[in-house]
Structure formats: C-alpha cells, structure tokens
Image (cartoon, rainbow, N blue to C red):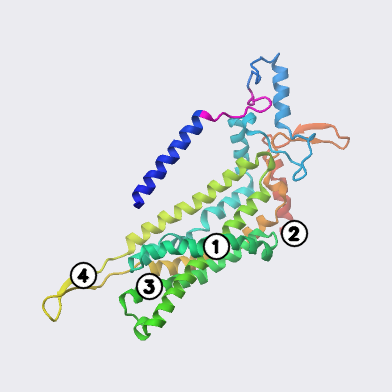
Amino acid sequence: VSLGGFVKGMGVFMLGITVLVGLFKREDGGSGGDTVGSGNGGNGNKNNGNGENDLEKRQLLLPNNNKVDDDDDDQELDAARLGIAETYHRLYAALRLPAVQSLVLILLTYRLPCALSDNVKFLKAVEFGLSKQTTALLSPTIVLPLGIIVPIVATKVWHNHPLRQFMAAFRFRVTFVALIDVLMLLTVRSYKNNDGIVMGTLNSALSQILFWGLLILSTACQTIVQSLQFNAQMTFFASRVDPAIGGSYMTLLNTFANLGGTWPSSAVMYLVGQLTVPPKCDAILGEDGETVREVCIGGRDAYFPLQLGLSILGCLWVMVMKKRVQYIADLPDDAWRTHIGEVEEDENGETGKERGGGSMEMRKGWWWRTMKGRKNA
C-alpha cells in the first residue's frame, strides 16, 4: 500500500465514522437539559413565571455546595446547561486575568527559538542525503519509548514543580540540543559526500559510529526536551484552571499553546527560504570523456546562521522571562479564577453581592497586593 493510498483510505474511514456518530449518537440530556436563560424545561413544560426562571438560572450559576467530591470541592458546571453565551463570557473574563495574560505571552513566544530544530532539522537532513526510511525508523525506536518514560521520570525529579521542569528543559533545548543538531547535520552532509573536516580524516567504521551516534543523540535529546516541556505545560494547566469551567479553560490554554507552536514554524520556514542562496551547479565531463559529474560552487545555507541567532534569542528569552515564569508559578489559585456567579458571605454567614460580576478592581485586588508586597520587600 502506498503512502497516498493509506492517507486516502484513513481519511474516508474517519469521515465515515464521523457521519455514523452524527446520525446515530444522541446527546444525553441529563436531568434537565436546559440552557441558561431558556424558558422551557427539559420535558417541554413552560415555567410559571420569570421569577422561577431567574431562580433556576441563579442556582445553576452558583457553585454547588451540597455535593461533596473527594477529589475536588469545586464542582465543574454543566456546560450543556450553562449555555454557549455564558461559557464564552466566563472565558473572556479568564482572559482578562493578569495571570492568564502572562501565561499566554509565554505560550506564544517560547517556541520561536526552538522552531528551526522542530520543523526544519530533518528536512535539512534529508536534503543533505539522509534517507526518509532512516528518519521513519527513529520514531518507533527512540521517540515512542522516550515519550513514555520521560514524564514518569520527570515527576520523580521535579516533584510537582512543573515550571521549574519547563525552564530547565528550555535552557537545555536552546543550548545543548541546538549544538547537537548542528553537529548532526554537518556530520550527515560530510558522511553522505564522504568529505569534510571530520569524515575526511576518519575510516569507514568510525564515520558510521559518529554518524549514527549524533543522529540518535539529536533525536533523543529533542524528544526528551519536548516531552519535558509538554508534560510540565499540561500539569501546570490542570493545577491552575478554574474548576467551574475546567474543560473549557483547558481548551482555551491549549489553543494558545498550539498557536504558539504554529506561527513560529511558518516564520522560520519563510526565513530559511528567503535567506538561502542555492549554489550554481554545472555538469562537467570526467577524465575519461564519458562520465558526467555535477560540480556546485557558491551558495549560502541559511540554517546554520539562523540556528545561532535563534539560540541567542532563546538565551535572551530566558533572561527576560524567567522572573515572569517564576512569578506565575508562585501565584495563588485565586489568581486564576474569575469568581463569576460566586456570592460573598458576611461574618454571620449571610449571602451578599455576587463576586466577579464585572468589577475589575475586585479581580485585580490580589494582583496589586502582591505587587506592592514585592516592591516593599
């Protein structure tokens, strides 16, 4: 089976499964099946008046304090009953939190210094002569086992400090891993051409050892740092999201994380294409007058200067952003919550006005108190 046939067959299969799910799968309406603000109940009966409708809406938006969960005291609201408008209102309120804005800034920028290794390295290796079969062989033998083992080991090393794990992996990624990638590409080019400073002075056995050693080391290091950062990222998300809208909150943060990994790839691809100057190649007859060989001169490969520039950018990113990363790691859980629909209680236990209903001063209270405390210290 060819690659094109496999992709086409799996595409038809997935489309068929999607159609079958849409035709035969029905959503579970739950106990009521209402959305916020609807005038009809799940059984089709109308409400007796606006008072009951408002009461039902208010009870839905308030945290459920009657049920006790062994894992988490905060109950996640039913998104189906909450409604699309209210869900997006809460997500917008979450985006206005200074803690979330700092996290979004980190997610949108940290992948740029690593984009060349993530997206161009193996393309450049194939251009230098590495076979596609070899690159495909690396995935089940190196990438998959390390992707399973690394998160398990990371939890034992960093002990639930995901952002320390994140920064340690990032420092390693923009320095040592970038250097190994450059050495690997130079070795691949020299090995396939049987020339170069290194390969021209080594015998065949040592050349193969150096070639495969650097290729495996480059792939392993990249897999390790990617697994470490992804594991740290997801652990931090899960520990900080507002439980009232946990699923939607996680989706929002993952959307920014995916966007932060998408735009750098387009940027580096464009830069490599614009800065690379292809060599001029001519066909020259051999000494026997029959064989023809191609001789290329000149040209400029943009990968290596770009890698140097991005590594410097990564070091600058660490210097500029490390305090921000540590700061959001130390923020309390309350800094990540919108408190929409929660009701304040006075000292006598009587309910008062709602929290998070649009008062920016109330949502900023913890921020200014923390900032003033840091300045005074």
Q: CA distance from mark 4 to mark 1?
A: 43 Å
Q: How many neighbours does mark 3 have within 10 angstroms: few (below 14), some (14-19), or many (20 or more)?
A: many
SS for dot 2: helix
Where is residue 275 drawn, in percent x and y? 33, 63
Question: In the rendered structure, which amino acid carries the disc numbered 3?
Answer: Val
Task: Note whether 77 is above or below 308 in the view shown.
Answer: above
Q: CA distance from mark 2 to mark 3?
A: 56 Å
Of the residues under marks 2 and 3, which one precedes in the sequence? 3
Residue 178 appears anywhere in the view: no
SS for dot 3: helix
Identity of the residue drawn at 57% across and 50% down: 104
Number of the front mark, 2 or 4: 4
According to the picture, the residue beneath numbered tag 2 turns out to be 376
Q: CA distance from mark 1 to mark 3?
A: 24 Å
Q: CA distance from mark 2 to mark 4?
A: 67 Å
Q: How many neighbours does mark 1 have within 10 angstroms: few (below 14), some (14-19), or many (20 or more)?
A: few
Of the residues under marks 2 and 4, which one precedes in the sequence? 4
Where is residue 72 drawn, in percent x and y? 75, 44
Question: In the rendered structure, which amino acid carries the disc numbered 1?
Answer: Pro
Specify the segment rendered in magenta: 24-37
Q: CA distance from mark 3 to mark 4?
A: 21 Å
Of the residues under marks 1 and 3, which one precedes in the sequence? 1
Residue 281 circle label:
4
Q: How many neighbours does mark 2 have within 10 angstroms: few (below 14), some (14-19), or many (20 or more)?
A: few
Question: In the rendered structure, which amino acid carries the disc numbered 4?
Answer: Cys
C-beta proximity under 8 Å, tags 2 and 1:
no
SS for dot 1: helix
According to the picture, the residue beneath numbered tag 3 turns out to be 188
According to the picture, the residue beneath numbered tag 1 turns out to be 145
